[in-house]
């Protein structure tokens, strides 16, 4: 099994430094430094040795909220273009807040992360998850809350989406 870690070059440098401080080699991981939204993600993965003929499991966790919607859509499309049939996408996706309390909580979070230089951008309406993935080349297998409740019956502001490439 091959592991590829795609992230901003500065973030990857920090991750590698943390691994080194912990005495973890990271030699089993191929680090692919690429600024999402700027870099040619399929070319970066190809250059790092990713085999586009084999099904791949792609995990996007803790990333989507920080990408503008058009950048997230472009990334999902790029990953679908690189993914062989049978590939799986696991995506943590922030949802549009559905009530006043949820909107207030999101506003506080947005302010807190913006102060640290990481503005929140993307969120998707729960009813638009299928369209969002399908327009990027993925089909939705399942969308669940962090508690494992189907997103259609959940009040969660986050969806864990399992996508598939046919």
Image (cartoon, rainbow, N blue to C red):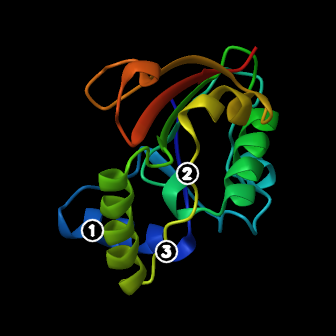
* Measured Cα–Cα span from mark 1 to mark 3: 24 Å
Which of discs 1 and 3 lies nearer the camera? The answer is: 3
Q: Is residue 17 visible?
A: yes
Q: Is residue 51 visible?
A: no
Where disc 3 sits, the SS reads: loop
Crowdedness near tag 2: few (<14), some (14–19) or many (≥20) residues, C-alpha within 10 Å: many
Badge 1: how crowded within 10 Å, few (<14), some, or many (20+)? few
Residue lying at 65% horizontally and 33% vertically, measured from the top left: 128
In the displayed structure, does residue 75 sit left or right of residue 40?
left
Q: Where is mark 1, residue-wise?
A: 18
Q: CA distance from mark 1 to mark 2?
A: 30 Å
Q: Residue at x 61, y 26 (%)?
A: 56
Of circles 3 and 2, the one toward us is 2
66, above or below 99, in the image: below
Q: Which residue carries the number 2 mark?
A: 123
Q: How many marks?
A: 3
98 or 84: nearer the viewer: 98
């Amino acid at each position: 099994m091959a592991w590829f870690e795609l992230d901003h070059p500065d973030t990857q440098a920090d991750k590698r430094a943390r691994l080194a401080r912990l005495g973890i080699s990271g030699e089993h991981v191929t680090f692919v430094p690429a600024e999402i939204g700027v870099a040619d993600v399929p070319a970066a993965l190809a250059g790092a040795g990713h085999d586009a003929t084999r099904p791949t499991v792609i995990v996007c966790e803790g990333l989507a909220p920080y990408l503008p919607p058009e950048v997230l859509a472009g990334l999902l499309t790029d990953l679908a273009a690189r993914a062989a049939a049978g590939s799986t996408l696991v995506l943590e996706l922030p949802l549009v807040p559905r009530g006043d309390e949820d909107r207030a909580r999101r506003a506080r979070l947005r302010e807190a992360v913006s102060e640290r230089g990481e503005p929140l951008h993307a969120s998707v309406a729960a009813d638009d998850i299928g369209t969002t993935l399908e327009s990027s080349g993925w089909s939705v297998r399942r969308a669940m809350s962090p508690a494992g409740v189907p997103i259609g019956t959940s009040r969660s502001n986050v969806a864990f989406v399992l996508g598939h490439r046919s």
